[in-house]
Amino acid sequence: MMDTNVITPEGYTELQQELDELWYKERPKVTKLVQWAASLGDRSENADYQYNKKRLREIDRRVRFLRGRLGKLRVVEYNSVQEGKVYFGAWVGLVDVDDQRLSFRIVGPDEIYGKKNYVSVNAPIVRACLGKSEGDEITVRTPEATKEWEIESIEYRKP
């Protein structure tokens, strides 16, 4: 299994921005709402208090996760020796015998959520592609099926 603590520079920046947004903007705002709602008196039936207290716990949980995760991640920068071969950060284009095409970017597992065509470095299709060149054929084995693809393109784009 590959190192799952890898991330692209763009992915790291996004996680850092999320942490900053939560810690410096959203948390202070929610904290003020909790204080305001608490000042109204009976907290047991105060929906504003209960909702914002719950939101504060969610923010704190995410902040703890992001701080821990960011400390473990290793940013993998593009290197020109990668050209012509499939490595982390590459955009890969595949084609099968039926002329079906598939295009994706190889990223760390923290970067795939909410992004179309981003695939984790741990995915079977990525493991089959790593180290290969354009024109190479790969076999992707999953629990459901085995499929043959040809690597049609490899590209390293600037963000």
Image: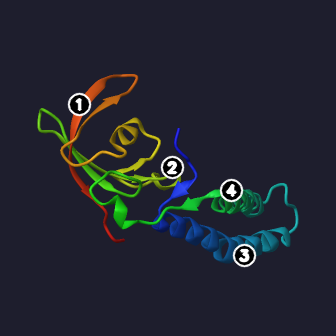
| Helix, strand or loop for disc 1 | strand
Residue 75 spot, x, y in % from top left: 53, 63
| Helix, strand or loop for disc 4 | helix
Q: Which residue is mark 1?
A: 148
Pointer 1: residues within 10 angstroms few (<14), some, or many (20+)? few
* Of labels 2 and 4, the one closer to you: 2
* Of labels 1 and 3, the one closer to you: 1
* Of labels 2 and 1, the one closer to you: 1
Identity, as a three-letter code, of the amino acid under mark 4:
Phe
- The first of marks 2 and 3 along the sequence is 3
Q: Which residue is mark 3?
A: 28
- The first of marks 4 and 1 along the sequence is 4
User: Residue drawn at (45%, 52%), measured in percent from left and top?
Assistant: 112
User: Which circle marks residue 109 in the picture?
Assistant: 2
Residue 45 spot, x, y in % from top left: 81, 56
Residue 14 spot, x, y in % from top left: 51, 67
Residue 127 spot, x, y in % from top left: 40, 39
- The first of marks 2 and 4 along the sequence is 4
Q: Which residue is mark 4?
A: 65
Going by the picture, which residue comes out furthest to the right?
41
Identity, as a three-letter code, of the amino acid under mark 2:
Pro
Separation of residues labelled 2 and 1 (CA atoms): 24 Å
Identity, as a three-letter code, of the amino acid under mark 1:
Glu
- Residue 47 vertical position relative to residue 138 in the rendered view, above or below: below
User: Residue drawn at (36%, 71%), measured in percent from left and top?
Assistant: 159
Separation of residues labelled 3 and 4 (CA atoms): 18 Å
- The answer to which quarter of the image holds residue 81 is bottom left
Separation of residues labelled 1 and 3 (CA atoms): 52 Å
